[in-house]
Image (cartoon, rainbow, N blue to C red):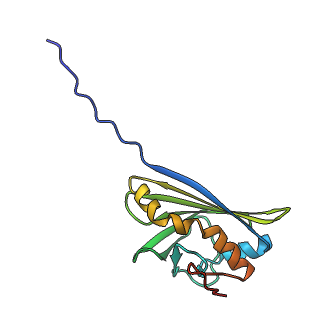
Amino acid sequence: MERRQRPQPQAHPKAKIMITYYALSSAPVEQIWQKLANLADLSWHPLVTRPHVPWGLLPKPGLFYEAVSRLFPFRVRIFVERVQQQHLLSVRVFALPGLEERVTYQVQSTVCGTQISYSITLKGWLSPLVWSVIRPRAAQVARQLAQAAEGRLVNLDGISVI
């Protein structure tokens, strides 16, 4: 008598979303890095606010801190993965179970000005849902950082903040 093997359930691959946004700024690299590295002041950031870090704390690999989401009324934990002074900042954001988020900022000088790149990678079964909610604001992060460094920050409603 032949014995049939029951088919093993296949694990569904995790959903993965990766995208990079760019902005060009007239501010020098040092000025943009100063704005980005000031973890206590995220007034320019369209996705997170109210970080719980001491004023003047600079990002270092291994640092954990908390901030509040602008979209949802809860805290997110942020882990600094990599830092290359005045060039790269890579963090992981722990917001919800079922979601893994990695964010990388890169700043480099070009002939036309300073280029800022903001890369976001979402993994997990919640990533399509979360992406549909944060996409409009995620598209503005690099531009908002450039405007804040230049001293002409405009909020999401088009009103000048600085």
Where residue 70 sits: x, y (%)? 48, 77
Where residue 68 sits: x, y (%)? 47, 77
Q: Residue lying furthest left in this view? A: 1
**Residue 128: in sight, yes or no?**
yes
The residue sitting at 71% across, 76% down in the picture is 34
Tell me the quadrant of the picture where the C terminus can be found.
bottom right
**Residue 83: in sight, yes or no?**
no
Where residue 81 sits, quadrant-wise, is bottom right
In this view, 154 is above or below 2: below
Which of 98 and 145 lies nearest the eye of the viewer? 145
Q: Is residue 158 left or right of residue 146?
A: left
Where residue 139 sits, quadrant-wise, is bottom right
Q: Residue lying furthest top in this view? A: 1
Tally of marks: 0
The residue sitting at 26% across, 28% down in the picture is 7
Where residue 46 sits: x, y (%)? 55, 74
Q: Residue lying furthest right in this view? A: 111
The residue sitting at 28% across, 32% down in the picture is 8
